[in-house]
Amino acid sequence: MWSCKKTPVFGSFSISWLIASFRPTATGSDGSRFRQVKRLPRKKALKGVMGSYQSPKEEIKRSADVVELIGQYVKLRKAGRNYVGLCPFHAEKDPSFTVNPQRQTFHCFGCKKGGDIFDFWMEYHSTSFPEALRDLAERYHIPLSEGYSAEAEKKRMEERDAVFRINEIAAGYFQQTLRHPSAGKPARDYLKKRRIPDETISMCRLGFAADKWDGLIRVLADQHIDMETAVRAGVVVKKEGGGYYDRFRGRLIFPIIDQRQQVIGFGGRVLDDSLPKYLNSPESPVFHKAETLYGLHASFNAIREKGRAVLVEGYMDWISLRKHGLKEAVATLGTALTDRHVRKLKGYAKEAIVVFDSDESGKSAMLRSLYVFSNEGLAARAVVLPDGHDPDSLVNERGLDTFEKLLDQGVPIFDFFLEQKLTEAKSDEGKVRALREILPALSEIRDFALRSLYVRRLSERSGIREEVILAELKTGDKQRAPKGQLIPEKENSGGTAQKKPPIGDLQVLSLLLYYPDTIPRLMKCDCRILVSDPQISELVDLIFEKYLQQGGFSPETLLDDMVNDGAKERLMETLHRPSVVFSEQDAIQCVTELEEKAHKKKIAASFRKVKGDLVAQNELLKLKRQGPPGPEQARD
């Protein structure tokens, strides 16, 4: 019992505040009394957005299997109770991405991203929460009530819906035009010349844009489509002087389809030699060229099964390979390869085989992709086709077997890069020039171990000493760094570096999460005063608040109440790592030790406040000798 028979008063100072600091004051759901916990504010951004979703959201969580869902995008393998794989959100060679089927959560120990299936869906597909909710509700056949989104999100979703509808109308119009006896004949003749059969035309939903300024506009007007929205969708262009016209005219049309089988944009190819040969949709609310791979919607299963992705440049390359039976290919829409492209592939493939045209632009594109693959941690090999060929012409003229043999002969991209540059060097001066051309690509590689291996290989092939190459590389790094920015000596595997919390803080959090029966004692001793990590402190406050309100909690439900991302990271790390408290006996011992520490810390703090006051100090000494209350003591 923490009490004194008399409470001495010294002027305006009463020692009762000291004793009160050791007494519980709040009442829990079981009638016991605890020290009141500071109430945390709800995350404002969630009000009106996530709050009204709780019922369908919980139903989706109950229906979904996080391993099955994430396993469609990331190659997972079982490791103990969890599943592990390479993180789709940052570059890594060793898997630090874990999925916990028991808690239905994921966490990456490299980039620190984590959460539930909604967090994964939003991060992977770059969508908002309302969009993720709708997508997953549709996937698991969960009905959603009207008016479930906040006004701003609802407006954004309505615009995306409108763009998808416009794209679908446009795709239908293009397909219908291709089938038209007279209007579609030029395109059908072209496809016949390119040996594209009807079943491939249907599978790819190929179409034709007639050489008219208002063919699609008339169709959209008949459907009462707002032309400004059609402009944002990218299928219509606004004239400077007023009015609109079709973006695609006189072109074979390749609908670009996402993994949800929705048309997000279009590519158009002229039927003659006029320029530009290809025209793509502009950026839109649903189409982002830097992260879109043509054909991935149809190829991702084959890529996962084969463990490789064959990367080509054009629409016709992909179609011809698909027609001949190679199903693990994707195309880059004729744009430079980006880190976002590679991250998407990394979820399915162990390696990429880059097949570009044999002309100079094709080789340059391949060389530019070197550091992208290196930084994203995806192994990549290079294949250069015989002069005058692209994948489309080669597979049509020489067959798939010849193409497959070339794939098998592919060499690591850096070796190809090195060979290309050094082959062009005919003298010592040429080797130095080649070195200076290679260094910028090397400097972009963030993995210092990999960079070191490449430097050694470059030294062996060029005859230039390693230390000279490293000195040149360091000089180049400093010149390329923005003013005032230091060149890092080393990097972690990705994400934002956080200071590692003390083991004592982790013990407190583990006890609360894995041994909830200890919560009353930890609340009573006010264990929060022992926690120095601000993220864990926030989590402890939230857990205590939940306990006071509900008499218990589930760790997974804490995700919805996270006030900041740092606290969420701490929670996910703790849930996905082995507990630092290993058994119930350990838990009891830990709680007893924490009670002792908290008691001593409060006494020490109080001593500092009553320095020079002998009576108050004597009262504190009595409290110190009594020690903390045991679990059996009443909570007066």
Image (cartoon, helix red, strand yellow):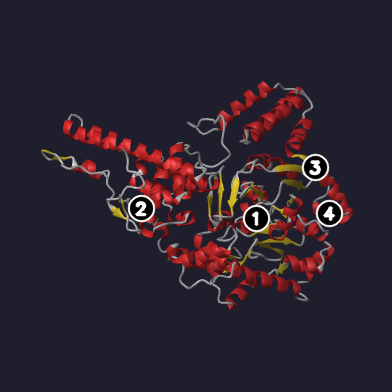
Residue found at x 53% / y 56%: 116
Residue 599's quadrant in the figure?
top left
10 Å crowding of disc 4: few (<14), some (14-19), many (20+) = some
| Left or right placement of residue 394 versus residue 43 in this view | right
Residue underneath mark 2: 40
**Residue position for label 4:** 393
Q: Which label was assigned to residue 71?
A: 1
Q: In this rendered view, identify the residue nearer to me: 347 or 358.
A: 347
Q: Position of residue 458 (x, y in %)?
A: 72, 28
- Crowd tier of the residue under label 3, counting other residues whose Cα lies within 10 Å: few below 14, some 14–19, many 20 or above: some
Q: CA distance from mark 1 to mark 3?
A: 29 Å
Q: Is residue 457 above or below residue 593?
A: above
Which structural element holds mark 3?
loop
From the image, state whether disc 3 or disc 4 is nearer to you: 3
- Numbered disc in front, either 1 or 3: 1
Location of residue 605 with respect to 182 vertically, above or below: above
Q: Earlier in the sequence, mark 3 or mark 4?
A: 4
Decide: marks 1, 2 in contact (CB < 8 A)?
no
Q: Disc 3 designates what residue?
A: 410
Residue type highlighted by circle 4: Ser
| Sequence-first tag of 4 and 1 | 1
